[in-house]
Image (cartoon, rainbow, N blue to C red):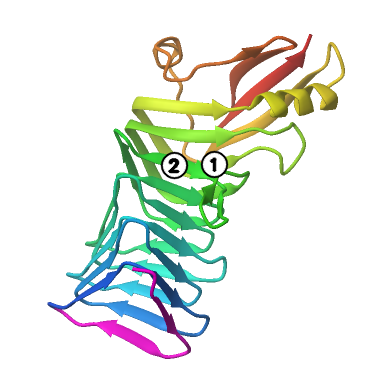
Amino acid sequence: SGATLYNYYGTLKTESGATLDNYGTLYNESGATLDNYGSLKNESGATLYNYGSLKNESGATLYNSGYLYNYSTSTLDNYGSLKNESGAILLNDGTINQYTGSSFTNNGTLAGSGTFNGSITLNSGSTLAPGGYFAPEYVDSIGKFTVNGGINLSGGTIKLSVTGVNSGEYDSLIANSIALNSGKLQISISNSDLNNINNEIAVGQTRSIQLLTVSGGLNLTSAFVTNGIISPISGPHDVFKLAKSGNSLLLNIKHI
């Protein structure tokens, strides 16, 4: 705990049957490779920064119970078992690749402005939240997250933040498909954000922002909306309504 390990330009391997347990800070720097064939554990309160190539091999397990950051130009290749534990943050600004035979279990928060090549299941207690950064704690912020695969919302939460109606002021989530079974699609707008929105929209004007796009088709049943899984919100000076347009979910905001 409190220790720091830097891997510069070389290869750090956890062999089959071995365990690398990080309680401090582990930096896998640009040009370096962290290759796990055994058990790699990033413990609660610890941080693993990947600026290079992080590989979780077939038969191996990568546990994240703290903060795991995948930089914008970096890759996390998962051939084994990748587990984002309860209370943990996996912040992906780069690319995560799920390969045949691998598994991804998200019981914490998956965030960032990167790409996830594979499918994601959001069970109870788990969250998918585009954007965010570490400073050094996790801070939610606006971002665009792309899933080249399916999202199964099964008791978890998709959190989409809105700070304004102009480009770069609201989250964007793109996926191939979404199964809306149970859980919550949460649209997060703070009081200060409401003030900003009021300043950006003239009285009587309506603006639409595109929060969610599903290339394979977006199916929203009336029961899904009325059961409160999607909850439109209203402020004292605005009316918020969700609407489906083609393969996209829009948030229409009218300043009254």
Which residue was labeled with disc 1? 173
Q: Secondary structure at mark 2?
A: strand
193 left or right, relative to 51:
right
Extent of the magenta region: 1-16
Residue sitting at the far right: 202
192, above or below 16, in the image? above
Mark toward the start of the polypeptide (1 vs 2): 2
Amino acid under disc 2: Leu
248, above or below 176, in the image? above
* Residue drawn at point x = 60 percent, y = 19 percent: 243
Which residue was labeled with disc 2? 128
Residue 154, x across and y down, in percent: 30, 32
Residue 182, x across and y down, in percent: 33, 25
Disc 1 + disc 2, Cβ < 8 Å: yes
Which image quadrant for residue 256?
A: top right
For residue 94: magenta? no
Residue sitting at the far left: 17
38, above or below 81, in the image? below
Within 10 Å of disc 1 (Cα), the crowding (few <14, some 14-19, many 20+) is: many
* Residue drawn at point x = 57 percent, y = 48 percent: 131
